[in-house]
Image: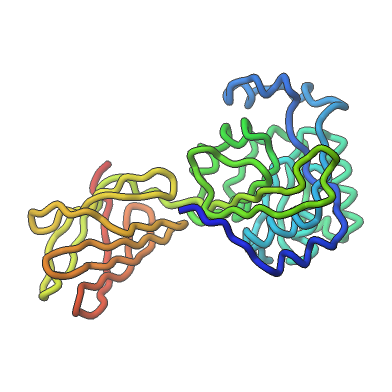
Amino acid sequence: MNAVIRFPSWLRCLNRSSRSCMALLGLAAALALTPAAAEEADESRVTEETPYVITPTVVVDTMLEMAGVRGTDFLIDLGSGDGRIVITAATRFGTRGFGVDYDPRLVKLATENARKAGVADRVTFVEQNLFKTDVARASVITMYLLEEYMLALRPKLFALKPGTRLVSHDYHMGEWEADAKVKIPVPDKPVGAEKASMIYFWVVPAKVQGAWKTRVPRPGGGWVDAILRFDQSYQKISGEALIGGKTLPIERASLSGDHVSFRVEYGSGTIRFNGQVLTGRMQGQVSASGSRTYRWRALRNGP
């Protein structure tokens, strides 16, 4: 379920001065391309007319705060512009990472900004096609990209390690709804622009689609074999459980990163599951009404 979140501490950011930030990638001609064609777009399309927009500090601060950025993270900024996000994370939290941009002028500017900020040993900037960038190392990815690029990147981002945090300024990923979003007032936006920005946040979910074999406690005692079948659309999951010859709906199912929880009404009680999704298995705790909590494991049993 989407949630519009508000943190009062963010309101204190409104009095801060704005800073130049990320570049919107691509020219209008490139936007007409299919995702596959866009991926192969020649870098020569980026010219002196490449859009370069001013992003207020409150947006940078909000993106980093929503992602919960810390020193142990590795942050990759797609469309890094003058490097503002990567440099701010490195300066404030000691975060390592790099930024990617098509425009060599902006890459040069970001590199110089990192040197001036004293974080050149922690961050780098590269002139590169973002569709060909290896982002598997990232624990946090920040983006300020047009919607066409967001949709083209969606399969690649969904395939990342569960728990990877994604934050986007102003543009979303269509059917992959954000886990949280916040609209923040930005009074110093350019003339003619809406005086607000929308920030979207996602956590890459584990892949649970398919069948899982397990054993569950009976509410009255003892154990019984069960098959859990999940349907999945990004972080939204539903399904059914086959227990003791009965097909029962899986209820209150929740998936965030690699953490999964759900419940099944069985017999006269409720079986509750909480666990972690790993490669080929789930494991965690299970309890039935009126009984204690047990260790629980499920093994993948087919598509």
Q: Is residue 128 above or below residue 241?
A: above
**97 or 25: nearer the viewer:** 25
Choose top left, top right, bottom left or bottom right for residue 213: bottom left
Hey, which residue is sitting farthest left in the picture?
245
Residue at x 85% of width, y 61% of height: 16
Residue at x 70% of width, y 54% of height: 184
Judging from the image, the colouring scheme is rainbow
**64 or 9: nearer the viewer:** 9
Q: Is residue 186 above or below residue 269?
A: above
Place of residue 32 in the rendered image (x, y in percent of width and height, measured from the top left)? 65, 20
Place of residue 239 in the rendered image (x, y in percent of width and height, measured from the top left)? 27, 49
Q: Is residue 235 above or below residue 264?
A: above
Q: Is residue 122 above or below residue 219?
A: above
Quadrant of the image containing the C terminus = top left
Q: How many marks?
A: 0
Residue at x 36% of width, y 45% of height: 232
Place of residue 108 in the rendered image (x, y in percent of width and height, measured from the top left)? 87, 41
Q: Is residue 256 left or right of residue 23?
A: left
**168 or 196: nearer the viewer:** 196
Place of residue 177 in the rendered image (x, y in percent of width and height, measured from the top left)? 50, 45
Choose top left, top right, bottom left or bottom right for residue 132: top right
Q: Is residue 233 left or right of residue 272?
A: right
Residue at x 82% of width, y 37% of height: 192
